[in-house]
Image: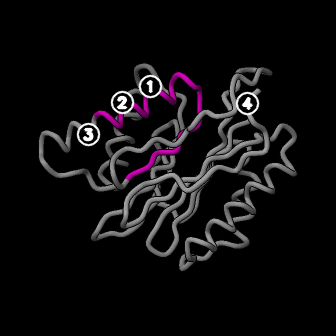
Amino acid sequence: MECVFGLVGNGFAIVAADTSAVHSILLHKNKEDKIMTLDSHKLVAASGEPGDRVQFTEYVQKNVSLYQFRNGIPLSTAAAANFTRGELATALRKNPYSVNILMAGYDKEAGASLYYIDYIATLHKVDKGAFGYGSYFSLSTMDRHYRSDMSVEEAIELVDKCILEIRSRLVIAPPNFVIKIVDKDGAREYGWRISTADA
């Protein structure tokens, strides 16, 4: 019952993800961080099969780092998203990854951006997006309350509304969420929304 969602505000992008590691009817852990830092100004929130999710996001992270090491300049968020889409498209015809990605980033020229990349290598630049069963509730909540000129405080309030909707309406709702933000100051963890601690 994965839930990953994100939005772009005025000069920043926020992504949030549940932190449950689940297989079938078993909950393995409550503190699985599904949002990876690609570089100083990029975040990747991923959902999907745990093995594919971890392997593919690490693969993208290392290749983005390799590009920066070889060329001396980092990839833009758009370039990183297109690279990711290309790798998913190539794998789709060989050994496909079951992974869906929201890539958030901040570039000096372009500002904050959010890219939606699904398991069949569809790429879209979006203002708000979501994956998983929680998307039914988070997308409708964001459709109602989202504005492109939101401040960080307003965006966090909207993220908390989405989490509340997921927790109150989804039959098997994930208890814990992690929230990360990227802006001109870089990518960083904003906070956790915890209702169940690990035993």
User: In this rendering, which labeled residue sits more in front, label 1 or label 4?
Assistant: 4
* Residue 1, image x, y percentages: 74, 36
Q: Amino acid at mark 1?
A: Gln
Q: Is residue 191 left or right of residue 126?
A: right
Q: Is residue 110 above or below residue 134?
A: below
Residue at 44 percent of width and 20 percent of height:
95
Q: Which residue is mark 1?
A: 55
Q: Is residue 174 above or below residue 15?
A: above
> What is the spatial separation of the Cα atoms under label 2 and label 3, in whole angstroms?
10 Å
* Residue 67, image x, y percentages: 20, 41
Q: Are marks 1 and 4 in contact (CB under 8 Å)?
A: no
Residue at 19 percent of width and 44 percent of height:
68
Q: Are marks 2 and 1 in contact (CB under 8 Å)?
A: yes
* Residue 173, image x, y percentages: 80, 41
**Magenta segment, principal secondary structure?**
helix
Q: Which residue is mark 2?
A: 59
Q: Is residue 78 left or right of residue 75?
A: right
Mark sitting earlier along the chain (3/1)? 1
